[in-house]
Image (cartoon, helix red, strand yellow):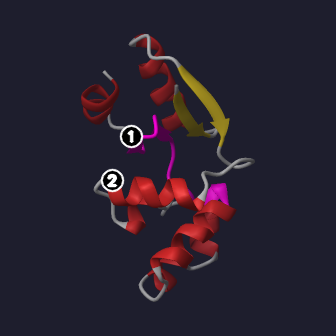
């Protein structure tokens, strides 16, 4: 079963859910703010998805900007950066969609079509 970490107030998440529904893809919705992905899952996504650490962060979010993560990320270890994400779902780029083997971060229809289509 696909897990969809998202936020109901997010337009991008709504578009991604609509796309999955239109393709008949079943998924379990997980509220990312209340239940952020674990550091272990984020590490798996980071290592297996071809993402840089910064791609896992919601770089336009208020929490990211207030905490000045952009300045701190370069000096953080991988473990520190992933732990921080796992502790604060508002820092995570969304949606995060995973089936445990394949992962997507954010929503681009062409990527969703290739991975979840």
Q: In screen coordinates, is 14 left or right of 89?
A: left
Q: Secondary structure at mark 1?
A: loop
Residue linked to disc 1: 101
Name the spot of residue 83 as percent of width and height, x first.
Answer: 60, 69
At a point 65% along the width and 55% down the height, the residue shown is: 89
Callout 1: 10 Å neighbours few (<14), some, many (20+)? few
Residue 99 falls inside the magenta stretch: yes
Callout 2: 10 Å neighbours few (<14), some, many (20+)? few
User: Does 64 appear above or below 103?
Assistant: below
Earlier-in-chain disc, 2 versus 1 = 2
Q: In screen coordinates, is 111 left or right of 5?
A: left
User: Does 80 appear above or below 4?
Assistant: below
Q: Which residues are magenta?
A: 88-106
User: Does 49 appear above or below 17?
Assistant: below
Q: In screen coordinates, is 57 left or right of 91?
A: left
At a point 48% along the width and 85% down the height, the residue shown is: 71
Residue linked to disc 2: 48
Q: How many marks?
A: 2
In this view, which residue lies farthest toward the bottom?
Answer: 75
Q: Are marks 2 and 1 in contact (CB under 8 Å)?
A: yes
């Amino acid at each position: 079963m696909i897990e969809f970490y998202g936020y109901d107030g997010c337009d991008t998440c709504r578009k991604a859910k609509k796309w999955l529904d239109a393709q008949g893809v079943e998924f379990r919705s997980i509220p990312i703010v209340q239940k952020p992905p674990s550091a272990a899952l984020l590490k798996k996504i980071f290592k297996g998805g071809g993402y840089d650490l910064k791609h896992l962060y919601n770089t336009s979010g208020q929490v990211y900007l207030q905490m000045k993560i952009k300045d701190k990320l370069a000096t953080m270890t991988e473990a520190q950066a992933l732990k921080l994400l796992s502790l604060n779902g508002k820092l995570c780029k969304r949606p995060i969609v995973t089936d445990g083997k394949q992962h997507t971060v954010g929503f681009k229809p062409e990527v969703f079509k290739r991975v979840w289509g």
